[in-house]
Amino acid sequence: HDLAIGTVINREDIQTASYPVSLVPRDALPSIEAALGKITTAHLIQGEMVLQHHLADPTNISHDIGYIIGDDQVLMAFPATDLMSGLGVLQRGDNVDIFATMTVEVSPTTIAPSPGTTQEQQEKITRMFTFDAFQRIQVTAIVVDVVAEPERTEAGAAQPTPNPADIRVRAYLFAMDPQDALVLKNMRDKNAVFDIVLRSPTSNELFTVSPVTVEYLLQRYELTIPK
């Protein structure tokens, strides 16, 4: 049957055929297995030969990953600077939320201006807010650095192939709504502090949580500020 662009190829979508060697293109696939899980980059008609340049590899984050995001999404890189990333907990396909803490300057609009000053001349107050900025974000891909520890060898001996000793996550790639991506960029530009939290793979609920401020903590724990 025909395969539309962006189709993930399964075993029932393709079959092998015999051709004279002189008619086989250089980028022909060697086996059905070589095509499984790949994504079509062009519309393929029933009976058409599937070639390497017809397929995108969704694990190739440098070139082909754009084929696995929706037409109404953008792919955004997000730095892996939080504790969860340092522990190496998150994996491709995980369902996560992004918590954020921001400090903003607000005008004391509820306070009367001091004698001899206007509302605009009053010193601004810095406030801190912590909130669940984005929910149900899927980790589309992870960019890592593989650090290899050289093994000690005797003088004159051949150097062995290094084994990956440590994988350091550099960034995550999120497929996001364009407006959400724009908001996330704005928050990054304003030096917000982020933490990624892992959700259950089957969790589709939008959590109802209250932003945390100093007033919220005082009320929740019934704290009294000494005078």
Image: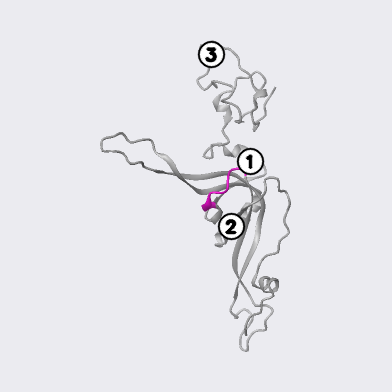
> Dot 3, how many residues are within 10 Å of its Cα: few (below 14), some (14-19), or many (20+)?
few
- In space, the residues marked 3 and 1 are separated at their CA atoms by 35 Å
Residue 175 is covered by the magenta coloring: no
Say whether disc 3 or disc 2 marks the residue closer to the N-terminus: 3
Q: Secondary structure at mark 1?
A: loop
Residue 215 vertical placement versus 89 (above, below): below
Question: Which residue is identified by label 3?
Answer: 23
Few, some or many residues within 10 Å of mark 1 (<14, 14–19, 20+): some
Q: Amino acid at mark 3?
A: Leu
Name, please, the residue furthest toward the bottom. 115
Q: Amino acid at mark 2?
A: Asp
At 64% across and 72% down in the image, what residue appears?
214
Q: At 58% from the left edge and 29% from the top edge, which residue is drawn?
A: 55
Q: Which of the pair 91/48 is nearer the observer? A: 91
Q: Which residue is mark 2?
A: 195
Q: Is residue 90 magenta?
A: yes
Tag 2 near tag 1, CB within 8 Å: no
Where, quadrant-wise, is the N terminus in this rendering?
Answer: top right
Of callouts 2 and 1, which one flags the residue occurring earlier in the amino acid sequence?
Answer: 1
- The answer to the question of whether label 3 and label 1 lie on touching residues, with beta carbons closer than 8 A, is no
Q: Is residue 155 left or right of residue 210?
A: left
Q: Residue at x 61, y 55 (%)?
A: 184
**Boundaries of the magenta span:** 85-93
- Quarter assignment of residue 189: bottom right
| Nearer to the camera, 132 or 149 | 149
